Amino acid sequence: MRLRNITGSREVIAESPFVVPEAELFDCPGTWHKIFGNDQPIHIEIGMGKGRFIHTMAKEHPEVNYIGIEKYSSVLLRAIQKMEEEELPNLRFIRMDAEDIAKVFAPGEVDRIYLNFSDPWPKDRHAKRRLPSREFLARYDLILQPDGLLEFKTDNRELFDFAVEELAPAGWHAQEVSYDLHRDSRLMEGNVMTEYEEKFSAMGNPICKYIICR
């Protein structure tokens, strides 16, 4: 059974205390520190999948608030199950399409953005849907604080080359670029692997990563 089609997943999500209700999302801009009950920095992962990366990050960095964003209900369900097994006070989830990201966070409200193994949308006509595209970089620019950072990892070299080429037209520049992350001891310090990263690196696929800013 495909994860996207698990019966009852939407009902579980609607009842979960770890998920911000969809009906309240557009009331959230400027209130995320109140939602968490503290003034800690806010880091978000867009397209978090089953939640391994962001759950691990939240556990290892209790001084940061994390928000995982996923549009597929049955994938988000797996992240909720992780939280039920090990609840973390500094982690919340959102079920939404990333196109609406600027409607959920106020200008400068986010300190860091993570994109991990995003859908490559390989057809040229779908380029605007790619999460590291200039269209999405413009959305991130609205919510990220002036000195905020965005980190992107993928094993898809074509997508990564596209992402690097999008930086200059979008007004961003790279602080770090690696075409073989796991052979870079400096960038690997503190690296938390996603499910896909573990799978693809075990197959011998090089993992690409950049860290960018404006």
Image: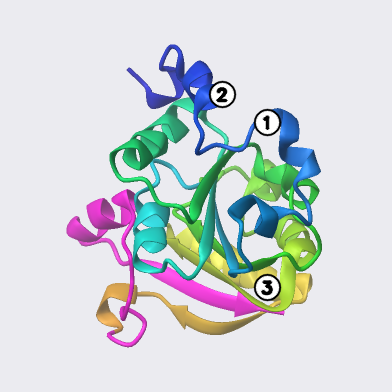
Mark 3 burial class by Cα count in 10 Å: few <14, some 14-19, many 20+: some
Looking at numbered disc 1 in the image, what kind of residue is underneath it?
Answer: Glu
In the rendered image, the vertical position of residue 212 relative to residue 142, given as above or below: below
* SS state under label 2: helix
Question: Residue 67 colored magenta?
Answer: no
Q: CB atoms at circles 3 and 1 under 8 Å apart?
A: no
Residue 98 quadrant: top right
In the rendered image, the vertical position of residue 45 relative to residue 23, given as above or below: below
In the rendered image, the vertical position of residue 57 relative to residue 46, given as above or below: below
First to last magenta residue range: 185-214
Q: Name the residue under label 1.
A: 22
Q: Which mark is residue 14?
A: 2
Looking at numbered disc 2 in the image, what kind of residue is underneath it?
Answer: Ala
Q: Name the residue under label 3.
A: 167
Q: Residue at x 59, y 82 (%)?
A: 174
* SS state under label 3: helix
Q: What's the distance in space between the residues labelled 3 and 1, CA to CA?
A: 32 Å
Q: What's the distance in space between the residues labelled 3 and 2, CA to CA?
A: 37 Å
Q: Which of 118 and 16 is in front in this view?
A: 16
Residue 144 screen position, x and y as percent: 71, 68
Q: How is the image coloured?
A: rainbow
Q: CB atoms at circles 2 and 1 under 8 Å apart?
A: yes
Residue 64 screen position, x and y as percent: 51, 67
Residue 89 screen position, x and y as percent: 46, 52
Res 155 seen here: no
Looking at the image, is mark 2 or mark 1 earlier in the sequence? 2
Looking at the image, is mark 3 or mark 1 earlier in the sequence? 1
Looking at the image, is mark 3 or mark 2 earlier in the sequence? 2
Looking at numbered disc 3 in the image, what kind of residue is underneath it?
Answer: Leu
Give the label, 3 or 2, closer to the camera: 2
Mark 1 burial class by Cα count in 10 Å: few <14, some 14-19, many 20+: few
From the viewer's perspective, tell me whether residue 85 is left or right of residue 128.
left
